[in-house]
Image (spheres, rainbow, N blue to C red):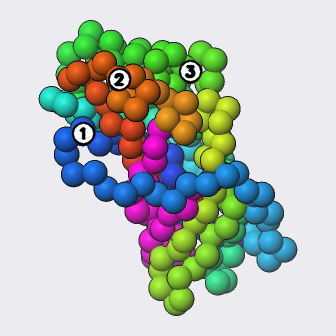
Amino acid sequence: MKKVLFSIATVLAMISLAACGGEKKENTETGDAQEAALRAENDTELDVDLVASHIVWEGTKIGGAHHGTIALQSAQLSGNPETKTIGSGSFVIDMNSIECQDLTDAATNKMLVDHLKSADFFDVEKYPISTFEIVSAERIADSNRYTITGNLTMKETTNSIKFEAQVTENEGAYTAVSDTIRLDRTLWGVNYGSKNIFKDLKDNIINDQMSLVVTIVAY
């Protein structure tokens, strides 16, 4: 069987909470959940590399910023190696794997990660996974760019999101990198520090906008 490497810098790899007071960019198009894509007859099921696949997050608020990674727990992806196109796919994100990479003090690092895992943010004890399902992946003309629509589920709340990704191929190896996906986190019930939810936060505001980029590698 022909070996295929399929990499997508996807939807669940960078989470970025934009700084309040900084330049706010428009949110990614978001809507109601849609029916997920089925595997096409001529598509091949690919083996996703869960080690190479990952999520990178970055968050900022007044006076500071942090970044780190989140791992995938499992994934399925199909594609057509002849036409070099993306097909259906679903990805399970391990919310317990959240790590911070910029804080070098172990105690401070643990404090931040524990807070992100708490009920204030992602409540990983109650919601240990998040998921993303591809609804459609449409190639833009003859370019190496795609418009991808999919269902993102966090904390048992599902909304569709639409974003673009760039896919490159090198000797049968495919790498796809999504544009930054900017979401209103409160649509998924991540309300901590939102000035639109809590009116007396003063300097403790975290912007409602979060950004996602996901990397998926498959063979």
Say what amino acid the circle numbered 2 marks: Lys
Along the line of sight, the residue nearer the viewer: 160 or 20? 20
Viewed as shown, does residue 167 lie left or right of 35? left
The label on residue 147 is: none
Q: Nearer the viewer, residue 111 or 21?
A: 21
Quadrant where the image shows the C terminus: bottom right
Residue drawn 29% across the image and 42% down it: 18
The residue carrying mark 3 is: 124
Q: Residue 166: image x %, image y %?
A: 45, 71
Labels 1 and 3: the sequence-earlier one? 1
Q: Secondary structure at mark 1?
A: loop
Q: Is residue 113 magenta?
A: no
Q: Which residue is mark 2?
A: 199
Place residue 196 in its image quadrant: top left
Q: Residue at x 48, y 72 (%)?
A: 167
- The magenta stretch spans which residues? 160-185
Mark 1 and mark 2 lie on one chain; the one further toward the N terminus is 1
Residue at horizontal 35%, vertical 23%?
199
Q: Which residue is most to the right?
A: 41
